[in-house]
Amino acid sequence: MPAHGPSDQEVAERVALLKRFKALLQEQRDKFRTYLTVLEKQHSDIDTGDVDAMVSHTELEQSIVSEIFTIQKVIDPMETLWRDAHPHAPDAEIPRLKTDLERLKSDVLAQNEKNRELLKSRMSLIREQVVSLRNPYAKRASVYAATGQTGTRIDIES
């Protein structure tokens, strides 16, 4: 008996699975690009010392990272389904998308490391500035401090 090919329904399911898998990989790639852009802007904010912008970018960064992890949770099972359905016929676009993703991940990690180092040096500089600040009142004695010229008797006879 000759082996029959997959039914039309199986082919349609495989095509839908492939399309969804590609769409998820592209969405994650776009998120990583956005993340890299945010990190680059954050780098310039650290450089200029714009604290408000740094905080804003940090909040945006946390949101993007959360979205990336959410997408990854869907990609992993989808990839397993794809491999099971197509063990011998991988799509040519999937490896390219994965390569793009890996490159973006390494770029993000490198930029993140640059930002951390710049932030460390910036914090060190600020600490030095704070330590070097001089309190103009540090040399003066407080009016409440004990000195050798304080009175010990009170004249209440007047």
Image (cartoon, rainbow, N blue to C red):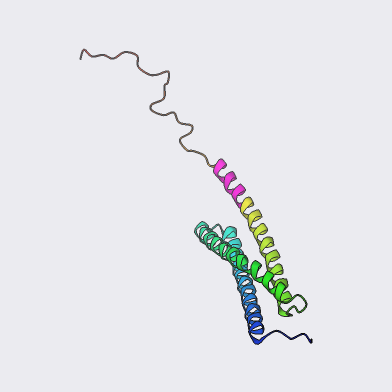
**Residue ID at (71%, 68%):** 102
Inspect this view and state whether residue 67 appears: yes
Q: In the shown orientation, is residue 88 left or right of residue 66?
A: right
Main SS type for the magenta part? helix
Point out residue 155 in the picture as x, y percentages from the top left corner: 26, 14
Point out residue 31 in the picture as x, y percentages from the top left corner: 60, 70
Task: From the viewer's side, name the closer residue of 128 and 138.
Answer: 128
Which residues are the magenta region?
122-132
Quarter location, residue 91: bottom right
| Above/below status of 123 relative to 108 | above
- For the N terminus, give its image quadrant: bottom right
Quarter location, residue 8: bottom right
Point out residue 136 in the picture as x, y percentages from the top left corner: 47, 38
- For the C terminus, give its image quadrant: top left
Inspect this view and state whether residue 41 appears: no
Task: From the viewer's side, name the closer residue of 151 and 85.
Answer: 85
Point out residue 94 in the picture as x, y percentages from the top left corner: 71, 76
| Above/below status of 82 relative to 154 | below
**Residue ID at (73%, 75%):** 95
